[in-house]
Amino acid sequence: MISELFEIPVTTVKGIIIRYQRLGHCTSGRHTGRPRATKVITDRAVVREVERNRFISASVLAAQPNEGLDVAVCPQTIRNRIKEAVLNGRSARKKPYHKKDQKRKRLAYAKKLPDNFVDAKDWESVLYTDEASVQLHGNSGNVSVWRRPHEAFHEKCTVPTSGRIASRP
């Protein structure tokens, strides 16, 4: 009767009843395995810190004193907690640095253009280039960022570049 009501096997119902008669409760016992090094509050603090600064490394985050991190943990544990929050370590995409006013003007200009202004063939003659190697913003190498799959071009997950657009002859 109980098994039909809850749509579970009869043996499961029997096991629960026997456990309740023997122990006085039907909760499962302690699970085996190594306990987590961090608590749920600590996990949320790690994710909050990464959301605040997407470019912070796990080793720096593990080394810095933080009120949310109540225990000392290794960088790999930090990486595991960040990964559980569906934040992946990726290379930051490079986007030209534009101020809000520049973006607004470019969008207004693009909306004024007719729909068939630029064809796919026209883009074949466009070459993105930057001949000079000038370091303007800190790191000249590969920059890592913690981001979700759909955040590739969000401003908080990109690094500015000073690329130029030039047409091929």
Image: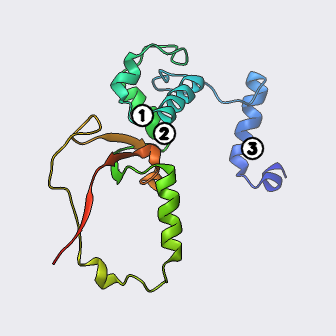
Q: Residues within 10 Å of mark 3 (few under 14, many from 20)?
A: some
Q: Amino acid at mark 2?
A: Glu
Please report the residue visible at 48 percent of the width from the left and 57 percent of the height from the top.
Answer: 103
- When the figure is inspected, residue 119 is found, relative to residue 162, above or below; the finding is below
Mark 3 or mark 2: whose residue is earlier in sequence: 3
Q: Amino acid at mark 3?
A: Val
- Position of the C terminus, as image quadrant, is bottom left
The part of the image, by quadrant, that contains residue 4 is: bottom right
Please report the residue visible at 54 percent of the width from the left and 23 percent of the height from the top.
Answer: 42
Q: Are marks 1 and 2 in contact (CB under 8 Å)?
A: yes
Q: Is residue 71 visible?
A: yes
Task: Specify the label residue 159 is tagged with.
Answer: none
Label 3 vs label 1: CA separation?
Answer: 37 Å
Mark 3 or mark 1: whose residue is earlier in sequence: 3
**Location of mark 3 (residue):** 13
**Location of mark 1 (residue):** 80
Task: Specify the label residue 84 is tagged with.
Answer: 2
Q: Nearer the viewer, residue 17 or 151?
A: 151
Q: Are marks 3 and 1 in contact (CB under 8 Å)?
A: no
Q: Residues within 10 Å of mark 1 (few under 14, many from 20)?
A: some
The part of the image, by quadrant, that contains residue 75 is: top left
